Image (tube, rainbow, N blue to C red):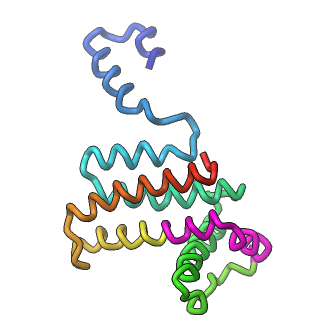
Amino acid sequence: MKEFRNAGLHPPFIPLLEKVEEKIAGFKEDSIANFIPAVEWCIKHKMPQQGFTLLQEGFQSLVMSHFQLNHEDRSLRQVFASRLAGAAMQAVGKGDMFKPHRDEHKFKAQVTLWMSSDFFLQAGVLYTQIGKFRNDVNHGGINGKKYKDVYKGLKKKLKEVKQLCQKHSVF
């Protein structure tokens, strides 16, 4: 923003640019964790659907990054999401019901590493809980959730993501 001020910008635009600068202050250039201030923005502006989407997708990218995986690889991303859901099933004693993703064989060694990690197992439970909220929102409340419950859920899940990541030194 400073470049704009120094480039001879008309004075009436300066307060507008200062406001934009203030709004994006929490974002860091090229940070995988930028989903956190984005979700906070969604909370502030009462946009839970966008917040849950950013939270679930951003959290998955962050967890993948923690395991030094390319979070932009679509096939790997699908296998990883499937295994996160499988970790949640395992946590509630339903691991035998898990059906591996069709591309899982391509990543067999990596899957073994993920599944041996406490962080991955805890992330799987949280990822799945976020996904259930996201699904409720995307179905327009048909699943019985009230807006205020969904909104509180977004705040709670963001807090849990931050706590889990801090506990495991992810960021």
Q: Is residue 49 above or below residue 162?
A: below
Which quadrant would the N terminus be assigned to in this image?
Answer: top left
The image quarter containing residue 97 is bottom right
**Percent position (x, y) of residue 4?**
43, 16
**Percent position (x, y) of residue 74?**
61, 66
- Give yes or no for residue 125 being in the magenta stretch: yes
User: Residue at left 54%, top 88%?
Assistant: 94
Instruction: Give the main secondary structure, helix, strand or loop, of the magenta stretch.
Output: helix
The image quarter containing residue 145 is bottom left
User: Residue at left 57%, top 67%?
Assistant: 122
Give the residue at the far bottom of this rendering: 96
Q: Which residues are magenta?
A: 106-126
Q: Is residue 37 left or right of residue 115?
A: left
User: Residue at left 49%, top 60%?
Assistant: 57
Which quadrant would the C terminus be assigned to in this image?
Answer: top right
Give the residue at the far right of this rendering: 109
**Percent position (x, y) of residue 36?**
45, 47
- Give yes or no for residue 109 being in the magenta stretch: yes
Q: Is residue 36 left or right of residue 114?
A: left
Comparing 124 with 142, the one in front is 124
